[in-house]
Amino acid sequence: MAISQVYYMDGHSESTETSLVSKMLTVFDAARLDDMISPNDIVAIKVHCGEWNNTAYLRPVYARALADRIKELGGRPFVCDTTTSTYSPWGSRSNELDIMITAERNGYSSAVLGCPFICADGFIGTSDYRVDLPEGYLLKEAYVAQAIAAADVLIALTHFKGHSMGVIGGALKNLGIGAQSKRGKLNVHMGGHPKYGFGAAGVFHPEKFKGKAETPDWEIIEDCCPFDLYHINDNDELEWDRERCTTCLGCFGVVGPRGLVDVPPVNFDAVDVAIADACLAVEKVVGRDKVGYINMAIDISPRCDCANHADVPIVPHLGVFASTDAVAIDMACVDKAKEAQGIPGSAVEMMEAHHPGDNKFEAAAATFHGQSEVASINTGHENGLGSRDYTLVEVEPADAAKYRFPYDRRPSRQRFKEQFEKFQPFPYDRHDGQGFARNEEVDLERMKRHYDHSTNGHHADVEIEELQPADDN
């Protein structure tokens, strides 16, 4: 397989042209993703809009800037996400109504984006397109969200981070999970699989259920499954219809912590492999030459944006990446993370994997020991999706003028001279032309000192004078 190119700019910003938004657009052009778009093409921008109360997801400004660039090229963009597997009894993106409310709360709305934000797989997650996948390593078919399958061009705009099941949440996961419909997700999660599915591989411990009387919140055990597969029978015993388990993950946080079912590590390993197969299916239906990838490797949390919280980033900003190869771009991000020093106080330091050369995501993101941060990458290399062998092409910043405020490019005198003459913001007529009432001079150096709080707020090196009695006069 040929060596792929990944275009890269680091995570530092010091000017307009080196802002992360500008870098995203610069690598978009450098990777020639703009060449994919013709006038009137419908262009899907696939993002993760973030779970309720998550704060690590990509700020909507990135999707907005990308949508604006696509419109410059003559394309018709829309930004999208998909319904989730239930994966929690209280998930905030399990149907279209919920995802639209959550997305808007997180800033993803048409008013912000300058284009529609849609739920790509319909109200309940069954609007999809089935794809035959004979070349799949594990999956032999996939179900791609309908709006994504219908697009002329697809840009995966991905927040690169960790993931408790996929170990990494990169481009492969954004399409291999995020571009699948709800039934597509159940397929990838091994629902109904005779060996790797949760129903097949989970170890059931009904004896650990001590009855309703000793389980005050027993109702949640039945209510956590949207397919109604857990029941407490007339003999006060827990039953699980495991043969019909879809691996929707809705019960993981309920039966697992209670010891009622041991979550099988093999299920997670199989999902990591299936992600790459499902990503290949997306490329097949949209077009192998019509899918581009941008990875924003910033705010690199150990958990996915589908968690209802965000932990301390495990490494500093790694940078912005773009490629036409999902396998290569994720490999490049993993390699950069491996080279990086971990952030003090983060999960990688707690796991003693904060040194350059350590596998950061296997330590900080994986649920089970032995999960691999390259399983999806290796599968994508194996099934022909892409290549884990890549050349990292460092991109120079573009001209700053390209990224200045576009709506009025005149310099300040031309923009404001007449307005300021009419509505003067500086009161030249007050205080002898100085404008405002202020002290003429203060001790600025005194305000710059560091103080030792143990000395009641006084500088540790300053001798405190005793208060003198007041003069009677």
Image (cartoon, rainbow, N blue to C red):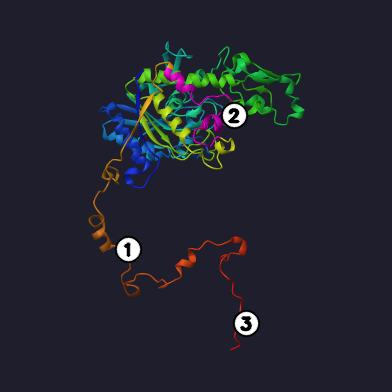
Q: Residues within 10 Å of mark 3 (few under 14, many from 20)?
A: few
| Residue named by callout 3 | 469
Is the N terminus in the top left, top right, bottom left or bottom right quadrant? top left
Question: How far is disc 1 from disc 3 in space, using C-alphas?
Answer: 49 Å
- State whether residue 68 is above or below residue 419: above
Q: Is residue 209 above or below residue 338?
A: above
Give the number of the mark in front: 1 or 3.
3
- Mark drawn on residue 425: 1
Upstream in sequence: badge 2 or badge 1: 2
- Measured from the top left, where is residue 289 in percent x and y? 32, 21
Is the residue under label 3 in contact with that under label 1 (CB below 8 Å)?
no
Which amino acid type is shown beneath numbered disc 3? Pro
Tag 1: amino acid: Pro
Label 3 sits on a secondary structure element that is: loop
Residue 322 in sight in this render: yes
Q: Locate residue 116 relative to residue 54 in the image: left or right.
A: left
